[in-house]
Image: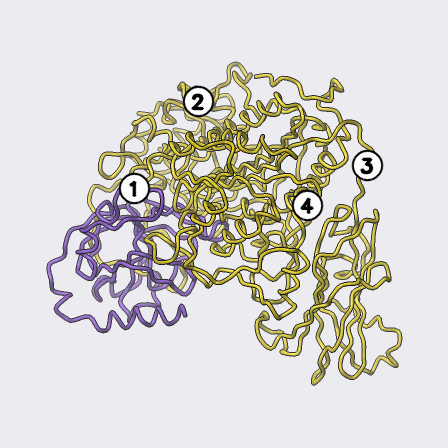
Amino acid sequence: MRLLSLLALCGLIAALPAARATEAPLDLTFGDFFVQPIGPRGLEPTPRLLAASGHQVRLVGYMVLREQPQPGRFLLTPRPVSMSEHADGDADDLPAATVTVLLPEAQRDRLVAHQGGPIALTGRLEYGPAEDESGRVSWLRLHLAAEALAATPASH
Amino acid sequence: MKTQALLLAAFVAGPALAAPTVTRLTPPSELFSSGRAEPVIARFLPGQRFDLQATVQPDAGQKVTAARFLIDGRPVAATVALRDCASGCVKGLAAETAIATVRAVSSDAAGKHEFSVEATQADGQKVVAKGNFEVVPFTVALGPKVKNIIILLGDGMGASQRTAARIVQGYAQGKALQPLAMDTFTATAMVKTSSLNSIVTDSSPGMTSYVSGNKNNNNEEGVFPDDTVDAFDNPRVEYLSEYLHRTQGKQLGIVTTADVFDATPAGNAVHTSNRGAGTGIVDQFFDDRGHTGLTVLMGGGRKWFLPAGTPGSARTDSNDYAFSATDPHTAEIVKRWGVAAGALDKGRDLIKDFQGAGFQYAATRSDLDKADAAKPLLGLFAFSNMNVALDKINGRRGSDKNGLRGGSVVDDFGLPDQPMLDEMAAKAIAVLKRAPKGFVLMIEGASIDKQAHNMDTERWMLDTLEFDRAVRVAQDFAAEQGDTLVIVTADHECSGAALIGGSMVTDKALADLAAKKGVANLRNQVVGVYEKAGFPHYKIAADGYPETTDIDFRLLVGYGANADRFEDWRTKKTPQRDPQQPFATEAPLKWYPANAQERDDALGDYLVTGQVPGESAVHTATDVPLSAYGPGALAFIGVIDNTDVFFKLAQAAVKGVVAPADTSGAKKPPKPKR
């Protein structure tokens, strides 16, 4: 089931028209995603989010510092957040507007080094529920372009 | 392999013959594991229910055809559910491995009991393995029964966290200006916190030891370990809430600043070997409310209550629970324990279900204020953990507007109207005090731990102050009622926090030194030890929290269980370290070399090298303080095991207290001295 949804995701990327990558990215902020303050039940997507879904966007946020990072992806938040997954699991301090950033398919085995401070990322925004292999459900995903990742590992 | 407990079948003709072997026997015992009769690991109250289970390996080509359990040599008269491991077992177990289980047994007879499993394989060969457990009797009471029990659990709150909160309230010439509410409790014990499988516990067994009397494995709550992968089928042990609801009709309240599915809240009512199984955990809170008496549930975690498909929902069938109607392995849980079977129903609207069952629903502090105390209450104030005290208070004050769009942190989260823990505690008590038979209430200050993991000193200090304000609410209620026993404790210490001294410089000078960076500036010129620490003077505002934590000559905290960290001693503007770089970098992202632990790309700062790998400070095995207030409080003294606390609480509620409320010998607690 989860594998299927992952595969479906991969399929989506593969099926992207090439023109999409060349369109001018739309500047979005985390505050653009959902109506705030949040109401008594779920999140309410803004017209701006619905319009941006499927398109190239540029987003500034903080890379979540994870105790147990996952290859091929990381989390982006409007504020710096760190996670202690070993002790806390999904009982985390992530805001509801957290974006899961997905590396290009060919780089899904790579762990991205944590970077402090705000970073600007450009990629294709996808809105809607998707469950990863760990069971975590994401609602916002940013698919990065192939050149978003440096060619060599971080030096230290 | 527990060889010493095997091959006890005297009728086996000779040592050359093979026989089935028992590789796990539950409840856990040293008698089974090492052959020693002491210490007894599993202890129960008279009548407290638990499951018996054995994992049996038959010889190659054989199959286990029958199994039975005996207690003190007498067969247990209940269905033995027998399953194999063709699927659904942990790796490495042969398909013919058998798991035999009897659900919900108990014993009324005080003292040590020997129990055994006798398993037979197809060729008739048998194996017997033995274990033991103890039934701890109630003793003659000195005073009346307590009607209510309140457990205040400061997650990760060791002695350092308590002391830090007191120092923030102020000291003069060596004396505290104002004690913490928990300082005014009449008795204190030191608690040993180890879990079933480690000296260092996590929050799951840390909580369940207090409310089940038994050690669980890390990450597991209300269950003993087993050999299957199903997170909800483990052998269970009855919780204090369930025992007192079943025998006395007491009701249960759970209040936390964490996501309500988190280990500490779940470890009062939910039985699972996977503390991360969010969907199943929140479902079980609701499904078995008639079994636990759940009447109040408050915290964060709304993501688990929204049907899949509603934006923000995290519900998934992959971490839900559903027991079989036909396979006795789980069908017997429903039958013998009388609990719900569950269903894989990620589309379930759990808020609606709670409302349909008569619960009020509060999504904000305003809703909480308006809630009718005559009705059960569900409060879900955040999608995951609630924001911490420092950020909630800044949001209320309208100060420190360092949010992305000129607001505060709580505005950035889209949840500006979250209650403080003491407000949640007061409402929970208002609802539960109407319970005719009394209640068990667990109130957790969750982010003392979570912010200690982050080594975010000011945030855990303020969460400890927030927690103490909830302690005060509970203590005031207990003082007024005279029939309520209150304990305040922790599940474990977190981060090895140590109050190393005080800053020798003003906050402005500290900011200047931070700009210059490096150990020569940020350590050698800042850290005042011994008399150079003096007494930090935080100014407490009318709301009970410091006006600012960035004072001159501030309190300094070191960490003995730390990951690498960059320290500048100043309050983090945001809930995590923010290097405050003025521009977003748009360079290609770096990726890690093979060893993901080798991370250091911020040379030049004051790097405090961690003693633990990874990015988070960790829990420690250090004993934690426990303080008690109310009738029978003086029973909580000495160095005790966390499981002892369960038996003391149950004694007070079921038979009556065995100690006075304070050293004057009074049966009712003294007025709090504050």
Mark 4 vs mark 3, foreground winner is: 4
Whether tag 1 and tag 4 are in contact, CB under 8 A, the answer is no
For image coordinates 39% across by 34% down, the residue present is: B367
Disc 1 from disc 3: Cα separation: 59 Å
Q: Which chain is purple?
A: A
Dot 3 falls on a residue whose secondary structure is loop
Please say if B461 is above or below A79. Answer: above
Q: Mark 3: which amino acid? A: Thr
Quadrant, the N terminus of chain B: bottom right
Q: Quadrant of residue B327?
A: bottom right
Name the amino acid type tagged 4.
Answer: Arg
Give the farthest residue toward the top. B173
> Which tag is nearer the camera, tag 2 or tag 3?
3
- The residue under label 4 is B246
Q: Are marks 1 and 2 on the same chain?
A: yes
Q: Nearer the viewer, residue B359 or A108?
A: B359
Q: Position of residue B519 (x, y in %)?
A: 38, 37
Is any part of residue A142 visible from this angle? yes
**Chain letter of disc 2 in the image:** B
Please tell me whether residue B369 is drawn above or below residue B567 in the rendered image: above
Task: Say yes or no: labels 1 and 3 on the same chain.
Answer: yes
Image: A74 above or below B468? below
CA separation in Å, label 4 and label 2: 40 Å
Q: Position of residue B90 (x, y in %)?
A: 58, 69
In the rendering, which numbered label is found on residue B579? Answer: 1
> Mark 2 sits on what residue?
B544
At 21% from the left and 58% from the top, the residue drawn is A53
In 3D space, how far apart are the residues under numbered discs 1 and 4 (Cα atoms)?
54 Å
Q: Residue B637: in sight, yes or no?
A: no
The mark closer to the camera, 1 or 4, is 4
Spatial CA span between label 1 and label 2: 30 Å
